[in-house]
Amino acid sequence: MSAAAGLGVHGLTMQAVADELGVSDAALYHHFESRDALISAVVDANVRTAPFPEDRGQDWQAWMGEFAEALRTILTEHPGSARFAAVAGPTSPEQVRLVARAIGVLTRCGFDENEAAMIYSLVTNYVVSSVQIEERRALAQEDKRDISARFSEAVEQSGGKDSAALRKVAKAWAKISPDERFRYGLHAIINGIGHPSTSDRT
C-alpha cells in the first residue's frame, strides 16, 4: 500500500504500482480488481491515519469544523484525491465508519437522519470542491495565468462607473489566501453569514 500511496492519485495506475513493487500487473490484479479499487484502498489507508475528530461531546459546529480541516489536509497532501472523492463517495469500510461517526454526532445534537445526511454531504462537498479549485488555480499560476491579476486587468479595461469600487475588490481579492477563503466559506456554511456590523459599514 505504501508503494501505491507514494505515487499519488494522479500517477496511480496498476502498471505503475506493479513496476514499483517489481511484480507483474497481473499479480496486482489478484489483490485489486481495478484501478478504482486500488485508489479506494489507498484513500482508506489515508483515512485511518488522518486526525479526524472523535465524538468528545462537543457541539456539532465544532466537530464539523475539525472534520472539515482534517479532510482538507488529507486531500491537499494527496493531489488528485479530491477529484476521485468527488465521484467515488464514501464506499470503503473506513470511510463508512467515518460517516457513521459524523451522523452520530449530528443526531446526538438533535438533527434527524435526513438533516444529518444533508449537513455531512454539504460540508464534505464544500471541502472536496474547494481543494479541486485550489489545485486548478495552482496549475493556472504555473501556466502564468494569475486569476486575480486577470480580474484586475479586466476591471481597468472596463472603465465602467463601478470600476473604482471594483478596483478595491480586486485588491482585496488578491490578498485573500486559500486558507482564509476556505475557512470563511466553512464558517458561513456551519454558522451562517451574519449581518455586517455598523462599524463594518462605515
Image: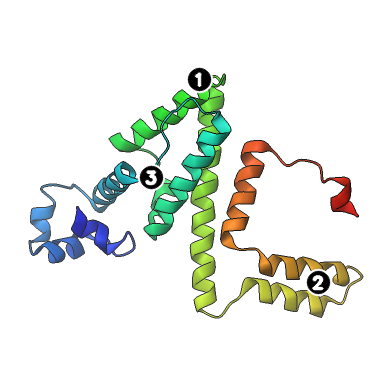
Which numbered disc flags the more N-terminal residue, 1 or 2?
1
Which numbered disc flags the more N-terminal residue, 3 or 2?
3
In the rendered image of this protein, does residue 66 appear above or below residue 137?
A: above
- Label 2: which residue? 167
For the point 81% across and 72% down, which residue is it? 167
What amino acid does circle 2 point to?
Answer: Arg
In this rendering, does residue 82 appear at all?
Answer: no
Closer to the camera, 70 or 169? 70
Q: Position of residue 101 (x, y in %)?
A: 41, 29
Query: Pointers 3 and 1 in contact (CB under 8 A)?
Result: no
Left or right, 128 with respect to 96, comes to right
Estimate how packed mark 2 is, as few (under 14), some (14 to 19) or many (20 or more) residues with alpha carbons within 10 Å. some
What amino acid does circle 3 point to?
Answer: Ala
Q: Splitting the image into 4 quarters, where does residue 144 fall? A: bottom right
- Label 1: which residue? 108
Estimate how packed mark 1 is, as few (under 14), some (14 to 19) or many (20 or more) residues with alpha carbons within 10 Å. some
- Label 3: which residue? 88
